[in-house]
Image (spheres, rainbow, N blue to C red):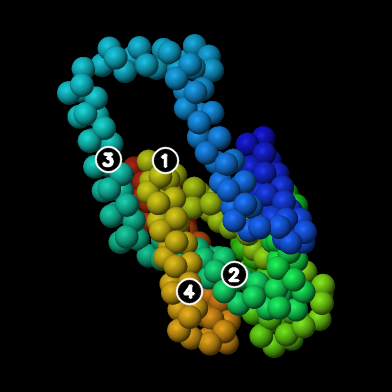
Amino acid sequence: GRFGAIALGCEVAFKLLTAGWMRLGLSEGVLFMVLAAFPLASALGMALLGSKGMDGSLGSEQDTAKATPPSVAREASTSAGCASVRNAARLCLDPKIWCLAMTNIAFGFATTYGPEVLNPQVAHALQNWAVAVLTALTVVCAAGFSLLFARLSVRCGKGSAITWGALSIIAVPVLVQVVHIAEHGWWVSVVFVLSGSGRAVYETTIKAVFADFYPGPLTEAAYGHLAMQYALASATLFMLGGAVPPAALAWALGAAGLLMAPLYYAAVGLRRLELHEVHCSSSFHGESADESVC
């Protein structure tokens, strides 16, 4: 909602600021200090707001916390932490989480492929400031595609949006390694638009899919797996970047994109089987159910 729009606008503004700064040939060290001042000011502002309280709710929460005995608070915190660990471990044994993992792996690869392979080519063909402008274009496109995919998911199902995201990911290494689109001037912006399309699928559809597959108390653990899978994939491709040729990274990204949709539909099939078994089990125990489907 509003927070997402503000965060997106700030990201675009910072990228355009970076592009303009580089275009003018100003010191990168000064740019770093300018950009670093924003998160520091934000943290300071949040600390001040937290100490004063934006409304009465913060004070009431603090009063409640003071009224709660420390031993009870520690016990509740420990219990909640243990439950989260148990849920995360439980999901490790669920095959659906590993089928859905390919979506996170593919987008993790895509996140690293740009800085490792594409951006240096763009900087060489155009200039460094062009990289900042094009990455800002990716963010803007991600916002626009998010609205499109939200409607597409409602009308055609989330699988359609995931398939589109997979095609976008597959197209990126093809355009970079086969077409050599970075050598064709600003036509390289097509790749950044496709990257924005993929990011929109990850930020909206994929997270909604995890919430659908793992509702209730399992949602937090599922999001933990989502973040872990994405981070591991991104870090793996980053570490391989200096050890393998760009073509190998392109093959890895393309293969992950090819597996995204099939494994997603495999997870959907497994979920339907589980729901069917639960339905038949309810019928067996005398609860109302359509016995013909069992």
Residue 250 appears at what percent x and percent y?
58, 82
Viewer-side residue, 245 vs 110: 245
Q: Is residue 219 visible?
A: yes
Q: Please give the residue where the numbered disc 2 appears in the rendered image.
A: 115
Residue 159 appears at what percent x and percent y?
61, 62
- Examine the rendered structure and indicate whether residue 288 appears above or below residue 27: above
Query: Quadrant of the rendered structure where residue 196 is?
Result: bottom right
- Amino acid carrying mark 3 in the image: Gly
SS at badge 3: helix
**Spatial separation of the CA atoms under disc 2 and disc 1:** 37 Å
Is there a contact, CB below 8 Å, between mark 3 and mark 4? no
Q: Please give the residue where the numbered disc 4 appears in the rendered image.
A: 237
Which mark, residue 256?
Answer: none
Residue 43 appears at what percent x and percent y?
50, 35
Query: Quadrant of the rendered structure where residue 158 is?
Result: bottom right
- Nearest to N terminus: mark 3 or mark 1: 3
- Nearest to N terminus: mark 4 or mark 1: 1
**Spatial separation of the CA atoms under disc 3 and disc 2:** 36 Å
- Nearest to N terminus: mark 2 or mark 1: 2
**Spatial separation of the CA atoms under disc 3 and disc 4:** 31 Å
- Amino acid carrying mark 1 in the image: Gly
SS at badge 4: helix
- Amino acid carrying mark 4 in the image: Leu
